[in-house]
Amino acid sequence: MIRFLVDLSCRYRAAVAGVVLAAATLGVWSALHLPCDALPDTGDRQVIVFSRWDRSPGIIEDQVTYPLVTRMMGLPRVRTVRGISDYGYSWVYVIFEDGTDRYWARTRVQEQLASASQSLPAGVNVELGPNANGLGWIFQYVLSDPAGNYNAGQLRATQDWYVRYHLRAVPGVAEVASVGGFESQYQVIVDPLKLRALGVSMMQVVEAVKKSNTEASGRLIELAGAEYMIRGRGYLRSAADLESVPIAGEGESAVVRVRDVGVVRLGPDMRRGAADWNGAGEHVSGIVVMREGANALDVIRGVKAKLQQIESGLPAGVRVEIVYDRSAFIESALRGLRNTLLEIMLTVAVVILIFLGDFASAMIPVVTAPLTILIALAIFYPLGIPLNILSIGGLALAVGTLVDASIVVVEQVHKKLELQPARGVHKAVRAALHSLRSL
């Protein structure tokens, strides 16, 4: 078979050159579209179901985790299901067989959640985890305030309501998680003795507070040929508004309000304003999680571009600082492959020129090495192999073996021509390849 391929290639040289150029062109296209990452994804194909409920681990295990685990065990192509219960939280890991389509798996889990959520206790919030794998954490930044003009709650609000929404619109971003700071909140501290004295229950207070922060629609009033839209504005704007929320009773003098049964205080991030902050500076971090199967290099570049675009809308004095950027590792690996390829080609060309004194022979490794890498990249794309440290390292090692084979072939061709100059270059190439095959 090898002899047949060698003879066929020597006989149809133009066709072989055309096939090689076509494969190399496909390799260039694949190189521009292959996903790039620092490390290969060796994790399981899994879908995470995350639940929140303010209960103890034992209750969550019995009423949330166990029902979800038993529901997920009947899904097709599921290899195993694992459940973890903690204070106020539950995680269910549904692990599918290798090769399962990630979106098909998420759809099957979502279908089961639609029916399983009906049997869960009231107040349980169930959601799917982000469409990412264990290597999805690709970028992290910090919103910092060196001058100390803003507290941790204000920075967290900027992260949650401004920066986060813009970054989630970047193609390839699955989730933007916020770390640090405080979420804005009002706390109602109820006195049980006052509740008993006024004849009000705790559920009445909870329901009153829930219903107070809302708006109501009205109707249209026609007056003097014009229409006026009526609505009731009831959004809370301060602690005083919350204190005035009615709980029970009729008539102004008989109404029991929130301030009559307890104290309304600001959350830990709202108790001090910018004027009396300590001035030490605060920061809130944001973690960008990449969607599974996306190109990490393109996603990081899109996130950086978006941060530069929205930086002008940040509060005065607030800066965005990058603390983790995986693109530096990816670009370093790509530069390493490029530099290794250039060093090998130049070294081999110089060695052949010195020992053989033939410029055309020196160009053979220079041409074959990049062409072979491009042909290998053309195979990467249909097989779904991304560019990472492992695959790039394999290419770098293969270049050395390839160049070594090129040197041996060139040396054998020159030896055949020295022994029989009249046979011609093509016959010498065929004879050299056949003699190498017999070694």
Image (cartoon, grey):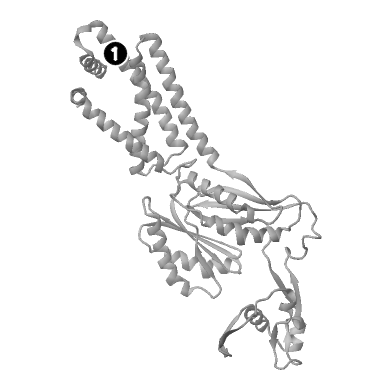
Residue toward you, 297 or 396 = 297
Q: Position of residue 28 (x, y in %)?
A: 37, 37
Residue toward you, 169 or 104 = 169
Above or below, 252 against 71 in this view is: below
Q: Residue at x 39, y 12 (%)?
A: 353
Above or below, 228 against 86 in this view is: below
For badge 1, the amino acid type reads: Gln
Q: Rate crowding at label 1 as few (under 14), some (14 to 19) or many (20 or more) other CA atoms within 10 Å.
A: some
Circle 1 sits on which residue?
Answer: 412
Q: Position of residue 248 (x, y in %)?
A: 69, 88
Residue 396 visible somewhere in the drawing: yes
Above or below, 297 against 287 in this view is: above
Say how many tags the image has: 1
Residue toward you, 379 or 368 = 368
Above or below, 275 against 418 in this view is: below
Q: Residue at x 24, y 6 (%)?
A: 419
Element type where label 1 sits in the image: helix
In the rendered view of the protein, which quadrant contains the C terminus? top left
Q: Residue at x 73, y 64 (%)?
A: 268
Q: Position of residue 45 (x, y in %)?
A: 42, 52
In the rendered view of the protein, which quadrant contains the N terminus? top left
Is residue 8 toward the left or the right of residue 242 in the image?
left
Q: Residue at x 70, y 85 (%)?
A: 246
Spot the residue most to the front: 225
Q: Position of residue 267 (x, y in %)?
A: 72, 67
The part of the image, by quadrant, that contains residue 21 is top left
Residue 73 visible somewhere in the drawing: no
Residue toward you, 99 or 222 = 222
